[in-house]
Structure formats: C-alpha cells, structure tokens
Image (cartoon, rainbow, N blue to C red):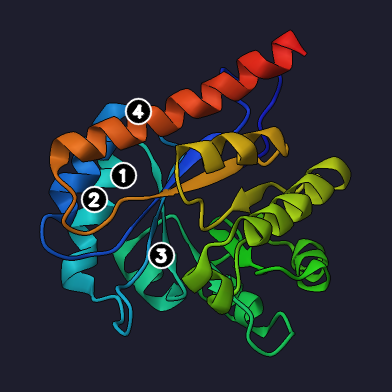
Amino acid sequence: MSKSTHDDVIPCQLYLVIAPGPTARERLAAALDAAPVASVLIKPRAGDKLGAGEVKPLVDLCQKADVAVVLDDDAQLARTLRADGVQVKTTDGSMSAYDEARDILGAGAIVGVDAGGSRHLSMAAGEAGADYVAFGLTDVDRGQMADDTAMARNDLLAWWAEIFEVPCVALDVRDVEDALRVAHTGADFSTFQIPEGMALDDVRAAVADAHDALLRSLADEADA
C-alpha cells in the first residue's frame, strides 16, 4: 500500500473490511467483482478470533484477484497463510505491537497501525516505519456513530494527509456519503464494510456506489 500519485485514476482507494462467516467468500467475490479494490482487511466477528480454516479461502481469493489482503491483529496467522500483512492496534501507548508484527512478518510485509483518534500514536507509528496509519472512531463512538465523531476522524485524516508521506486510512466509514467526505480529506484509503448476511446483489451495489463516491470526489476537486 502506497500513497496515490497524480497519475492514478482515483486518489482515495477502496479498502474493504469483511469478517469470516457464512457466505463470506461469496460476498467478498461479489465485492471484488463490483469495483476496483486496493486492499481487503479481514477482521474477526465480535468476540471471536480469526481461524486459519475460515480465513484461508478469503486470502486465496484476494491474492488470485491481485488485491492486497491484511489480517487484523494476528501477524502469526498472516505469516502462516502468507497474507500480505497485518493491521495492529496499540493498547499500551507504545509501538510494541508494531515491532512484534514486523519481527514476525519481515520488512517486505504490510504492517499498518490503527491509531484510533491519537495524533501521538499516529506519529509514533510513522516514525517506527508503519506502512500506513489508520484513524477511526473510539469504541464508544462506534456505538453512537455520531456525525461529530466522524468529523473528528476526518480532521485527523486531513491533518495527516497534508503533513506526512505515510499513507492514511479512514476506518469506520459508515456509508457512501461518509466515504465521499473521507475522500475530500486527502485520505489515501477509505474502508467500506461488507456486512454479514448482506445479499450478493446488495454487496455489488454498495461497493459500486462507494467507488462512484470516491470518483465523485475527484470530479469535485476538478470543478473547484
């Protein structure tokens, strides 16, 4: 994962998020077929851990489609399944989780850091060598999904994109309009959740709409 250039068709790229489970492979295949996707983040369902048996088909599908696939907070499993990397989150204010993941996966793998809403952690991650820094909502905010918390995330994205070269990712993107606002911050990647149980036609439509929103941001900038 790297920063977009002026030669790219779209400056803010789609970063899909999916949890293993019933029809996960079918939903992911539908999403990858609907629009260009830069990366996929595989996260466990709430209260679960990622298991090799259910994650491997998703990793294989992404790699067959030449899409980078990253596992959430399990570097050892990423190494076992030969995924492209891992996203870690610090809980103690240090970069120990990043350092451990880098030791396990090596210099050639993607190791991104979820900095939540912390400028301090994001800068520490960038200095440590993270391949990307992600900003999202806090656990409390995720439950409320209030507009002001999304605005705070977007302020962090705009701040980071203006100053730093390390790519930034918007987490917890709620819908198509939120993706459009994220794109206007200068973020390099906008996540988009593929919910469990979503019908395949709805998956295709939602991912296509998200991609169209990111394209709209490019047109908006050209008209400005």
**In the image, which is nearer the foreground, mark 3 or mark 2?**
3
Labelled disc at residue 202: none
In the image, what residue occupies the spot 61% across and 50% down? 169
Three-letter residue code for mark 3: Leu
Q: Quadrant of the C terminus?
A: top right
Labelled disc at residue 60: 2
The outermost residue toward the bottom is 92
Q: Can you identify the residue that label 4 sits on?
A: 208
**In the image, which is nearer the foreground, mark 1 or mark 3?**
3
Q: Position of residue 121 (x, y in %)?
A: 77, 72
Q: Point out the tag, 3 or 4, that comes first from the N-terminus.
A: 3
* Depicted 162 relative to depicted 129: above or below: above
Q: With 175 as the anchor, is 132 left or right in this view?
A: right
**In the image, which is nearer the foreground, mark 3 or mark 4?**
4
Q: Position of residue 33 (x, y in %)?
A: 25, 30
Q: Separation of disc 2 and disc 1 at Cα?
A: 5 Å
Q: Position of residue 105 (x, y in %)?
A: 51, 68
Circle 2 packing at 10 Å, graded few (<14), some (14-19), many (20+), is: some
Q: Separation of disc 2 and disc 4 at Cα?
A: 22 Å
Circle 4 packing at 10 Å, graded few (<14), some (14-19), many (20+), is: some
Q: Can you identify the residue that label 3 sits on?
A: 71
Q: Can you identify the residue that label 1 sits on?
A: 63
